[in-house]
Amino acid sequence: MRKLPKRTYNDELYRDEWQWQEGDLTVTRNCQWSGPGCHEGCGVLHYTDKEGRVVRIEGDPKSPVYNGRLCMRCMAVPEAMYNKMRVTNPLKRAGERGENKWEEITWDEAYAIIEENAKRLSAAYGPKTIAVLQGTGRNTSWQAAAIANVAYQTPNLMFGFLAGDSCYVPRLVGMSSVAGDASIMDCAQMFEDRYDNPRYVVPEICIVWGNNPIISNGDGFMGHWIVDLMRMGTELIVIDPRLTWMAGMAKHWLRVRPGTDGALALAMIDVIIKEDLYDHEFVDCWCYGFDQLKERAAEFPLDVAEHITTIPADLIQAAARDYAKAKPAAVQWGLALDQQKHGLGANHAIQALWAITGNVDVPGGNILVTSGYIQADVRTTFQWDVPEAYARLGNAESKLRAQGMDNSAATEILIKALETGEPYPVKMIHCTSSNTFANMGAEAERVYKAMLNAEFIVVSDLYLTPTAVGTADVFLPVAMSAERKGVRGWWAPIRAINKVSDYANTKSDEEIALDIGRRMNPEAFPWKTLEEMWDDIMNNLQSANFDDGEPFSYDNLQKRTYRYEVFEYKKYEKGLLRADGLPGFNTPTGRLELWCTTLNSCDLEPLPYFEEPSPSPFSTPDYASEYPLILTTGHRSWEFFHSEHRNLRSMREFHPWPLVDIHPDTAVKYGIKEGDWVLIENHRGSAKEICRLNPSMDPGVVSAEHGWWFPEREAALPELYGVFESNINMLTPSTDVGPSGLAAPYSTQMCRISKVEGYVPPEISL
Ligand SMILES: Nc1nc2c(c(=O)[nH]1)N[C@H]1C(S)=C(S)[C@@H](COP(=O)(O)OP(=O)(O)OC[C@H]3O[C@@H](n4cnc5c(=O)[nH]c(N)nc54)[C@H](O)[C@@H]3O)O[C@H]1N2
Ligand SMILES: Nc1nc2c(c(=O)[nH]1)N[C@H]1C(S)=C(S)[C@@H](COP(=O)(O)OP(=O)(O)OC[C@H]3O[C@@H](n4cnc5c(=O)[nH]c(N)nc54)[C@H](O)[C@@H]3O)O[C@H]1N2
Ligand code: SF4
Ligand SMILES: [Mo]
């Protein structure tokens, strides 16, 4: 392995003034969290003019986390802020739902309408009749929870119809069941001095599994950290049906058939055990259920795994050997593991892989992060006592949910509740930061129609999205990142968000939570101002281990911009994981559970497992003869965050239309050329996307984009911004979730394709 010296980025002390003047412009070191959204919240410099408008944004070169990097979407932040679609006042529906007729109202009027409806419907049906829908993790998550559980006091907080909570939740629940805590790949992100920290070791191998991190930077993980490590000698193994940039740079690229990752991981485990490449000491001292794992893995010898995954046996073997021999080695995994119905089995197998090779909580391996969600501490600020918690939608169907392993209600039950009134009527929806049927919800049109059954709907967003136009009775316009004071507390380090700008009559999500909370549940919201609430929240954040002797306050954080927790490796040896202070993992056996007692107690498969996706050429051959191509969806692009950024001219110049990746031979077979509009169909529905030839994929697999709507088109019905025309979630199922209620097959559907003749879309006039 090529070994380069560790590289120092923080050549100057990164701590500096947090604000200064450059000519007429004020420059503020800041954190650009949502909105518009992204999981990261990178370190940026906001340049504001005398009027307080953000005129420019740059990466903060002194950020220890991001080192000045900035994506094109962040460069377009001023365009997003002053976009003509931005809503400047709260709105009340004037015509029918979907007519896009609105009356501007004051915030007080909006809140009064919300309060009246929420109190009336709660009195009639109980607070559980209110469903609060939220989007993906960003600066809206704890706020949505506060609105749902504390303000309205409903247990029904959930994603905006994301089937099976299939974004990170399956991986998180899998990790807390098996290991008692969440793990992430160690890229020295826990240290202020990053790669220079003497305790850090550069991994020899990194497996990038179902993840495209330099585009997606998902869940607080910056993809370019892996690029840093590659420069220091780390080699890659990439497991992906498409040749991503990282796959192109990898030592091994394993072109897996979508949805078969569980079989692949078990086959790799089998090689490692049979060739005695596993870490005996870690297995003997810290793992539970090794013998059962060994038996399970033996069901997946290389020839069987080759048949299932379509990856050549020798390649699986080489990848298993290289990973096991590398010390240390890390896995960076992604969404693809959540978007297959039996993703929990695959994620258990991958955890077993990093456990038996001794890569748990070691430098350069997969580290345990006990307080990954500092934002969870925010909850201690509120009285989190939900009266009807037992009645949460989905608890009856999933013991895992009922035991509190997953904090959100089940969207597959919500959709039925809206359609049938069973198990109880859901009469009100408060949708915040989710563009439900443009993006999150499978069976998009079904979601839209189901939502219409709610008597009263609030949508809070930055723009009038298809979800807002189609369903909202009241619309609350939200402040963007530079218009909000706050704290970014999702993984280390904690960061200050400074308010440097103001825009019209918008409010932040936390202010909306406070305002609604003071009306609905005043005892739990004793603060008169947002400032007072933040002071209390900051006090409670001290439960995180910021043991460096400096005072803990917003002002202090603002001056420092970043603040790190104390971090220890091998916490299981030091008694740092369990409430009883004993060594071991925070699981019932005190060990990392290859045979999982928690899953077993929830009547779920206790061992890592693989089940053939359905539909598939093997499990449903008749269906496959009608819909012969495997359809995976939602690979990310640079220009868009889900359904966001479609209204930004600059992003649409780079990426004007939805793209579906098709192998050239497959395109020829169906008479399709690059640039043709293609109809992607299955028995549920269809979507139109443009063909992009991709010779790297298996000819039997196509990969389609998600999140498409067309802000340039008519908002009102019947167009509704063309939201159902290129919406790949017309083909995905909303109720076909994994046995635990978690994970859903967004990436393992089947379809057929044909050329759309003569289609000319309306011009993009943004
Ligand atoms: N077929 C398919 N479907 C998918 C996926 C896939 O891979 N394939 N991916 C799924 C995944 S993993 C996820 S997480 C979901 C994401 O689904 P969503 O989170 O719903 O997606 P977004 O379009 O990012 O966000 C929705 C809205 O939030 C608004 N917003 C942004 N910032 C803020 C803010 O600070 N406050 C408020 N109130 N609103 C804000 C945006 O303007 C946008 O309209 O999509 C899912 N859908
Ligand atoms: N630019 C941008 N960034 C984003 C988002 C966005 O919309 N745009 N969304 C954010 C959100 S909410 C999330 S959850 C993350 C997700 O980010 P990632 O975890 O990176 O997820 P994807 O890009 O959907 O898929 C990653 C890779 O999985 C591959 N893949 C598809 N099916 C399979 C399979 O069955 N097995 C394997 N092994 N690989 C498969 C795809 O080809 C793709 O290259 O990104 C976040 N970041
Ligand atoms: S990852 Fe990219 S889009 Fe997200 S905050 Fe950082 S620079 Fe902005
Ligand atoms: Mo996600």
Image (spheres, grey):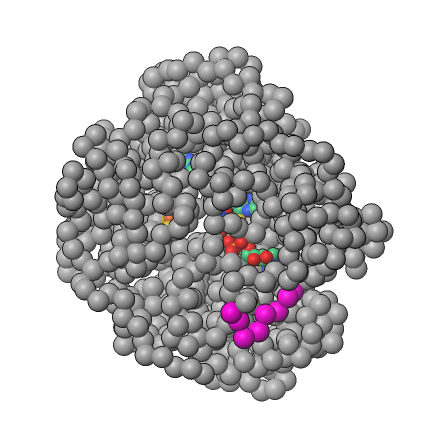
Taking 692 as reference, is 137 left or right?
Answer: left
**As drawn, 453 above or below 186:** above
**Could you say where residue 10 lies in the image, as x and y percent from the top left?**
24, 65
Quadrant assignment, res 573: bottom left
Count of numbered circles on the image: 0
Residue 445 shows in the view: yes
What residue is at 84 percent from the left and 51 percent from the top? 625
Residue at 61 percent of width and 46 percent of height = 659
Of the 4 image quadrants, the one containing the N terminus is bottom left
- Residues in magenta, as a range: 249-256
Question: Is 251 a magenta residue?
Answer: yes
Examine the image and state in which quarter residue 454 appears.
top right
x, y percent for residue 61: 26, 57
- Residue drawn at the location 54% of the way across and 67% of the way down: 248
**Secondary structure predominantly adopted by residues drawn in magenta:** loop
Picture coordinates of residue 757 (x, y %)? 74, 36
Please name whichever residue, 73 or 433, is drawn nearer the observer in this view of the structure.
73
Q: Nearer the viewer, residue 701 or 203?
A: 701
Decide if residue 600 is on the left or right side of residue 547: right
In the rendering, at what x and y percent does residue 41 appear?
35, 49
Give the answer, above or below, for where 345 lies relative to 88: below
**Is residue 9 magenta-colored?**
no
Nearer the observer, 289 or 469: 469
